[in-house]
Image (cartoon, rainbow, N blue to C red):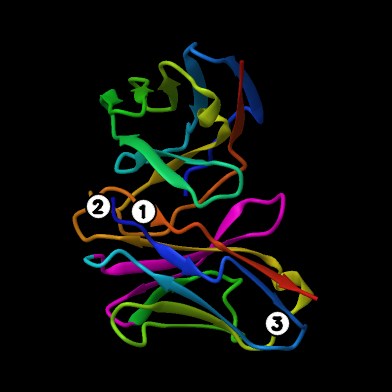
Amino acid sequence: DAKTTQPPSMDCAEGRAANLPCNHSTISGNEYVYWYRQIHSQGPQYIIHGLKNNETNEMASLIITEDRKSSTLILPHATLRDTAVYYCIPFNAGGTSYGKLTFGQGTILTVHP
Amino acid sequence: EPEVTQTPSHQVTQMGQEVILRCVPISNHLYFYWYRQILGQKVEFLVSFYNNEISEKSEIFDDQFSVERPDGSNFTLKIRSTKLEDSAMYFCASTSPSGTEAFFGQGTRLTVV
């Protein structure tokens, strides 16, 4: 499994964009970058994933560098409910979602008023 | 939106007792997982289950643990003789064959006293 490095914590003001970085320099060519979050010990929640192109959905945007060694999750207008632990997880499932997820320590994002 | 349901939300048991944690995955999903999270630590993979058999398990998942899908809807995790160190949040998850994300339940907090 590729190793990831994320800052342990970040702060963001409500309404501002939250940019969460992840280094995954050992990612292999067929591993996607997945992002999940965990709100206050609830079950992890899927956010977004990508292989090499930037991706956007209703929750967030994902920017992957051209060399795929790092990525940034962007929450465009953070709210207090976005306070959570955010996990960046390289994952190879052959294009499906089957397989174990290897969680790191993640980044604790605190959104303040 | 479909969801993974876990019961009970909290279970307290005496050391040495058997516990069964129950999960109802999303109905058309075929892959099922158990993860656990000891307080303050990472989410850790325990086991994956497909086609009525274990497809992968971690070192944590020793002979004290077993999983079962007894009736086509429930997915259970049994711990035969609980230890203090089994105290943790246990999360069930499921994925569909063509899906791109894992859906997690809200967890069962197991406290062994």
- Residue A32 occupies quadrant: top left
Q: Amino acid at mark 2?
A: Gly
User: Could you give the CA–CA distance between mark 1 and mark 2, rounded to whole angstroms?
Assistant: 14 Å
Residue B52 percent location from the top left of the image: 31, 82
Residue B40: numbered disc:
none
* Above or below, comparing residue B29 to residue A93 in the picture: below
For disc 2, the neighbor class at 10 Å (few under 14, some 14 to 19, many from 20) is: few
Using the image, name the chain to which the residue with label 2 belongs.
A
Q: Determine which residue is flagged by label 3.
A: B82
* Above or below, comparing residue A109 to residue B94 in the picture: above
* Dot 1: element: loop
Is residue B28 toward the left or the right of residue A112 in the image? Answer: left
Using the image, name the chain to which the residue with label 3 belongs.
B
Could you tell me which residue is drawn at 21 percent across and 66 percent down?
Answer: B28
Camera-nearest residue between B12 and A60: B12
Same chain under badges 2 and 3? The reply is: no
Same chain under badges 1 and 2? The reply is: no
Q: Determine which residue is flagged by label 1.
A: B102
Q: Determine which residue is flagged by label 2.
A: A94
User: Could you give the CA–CA distance between mark 1 and mark 3, rounded to whole angstroms?
Assistant: 28 Å
Magenta stretch: helix, strand or loop mostly: strand
Camera-nearest residue between B55 and A44: A44
* Above or below, comparing residue A20 to residue A37 in the picture: above
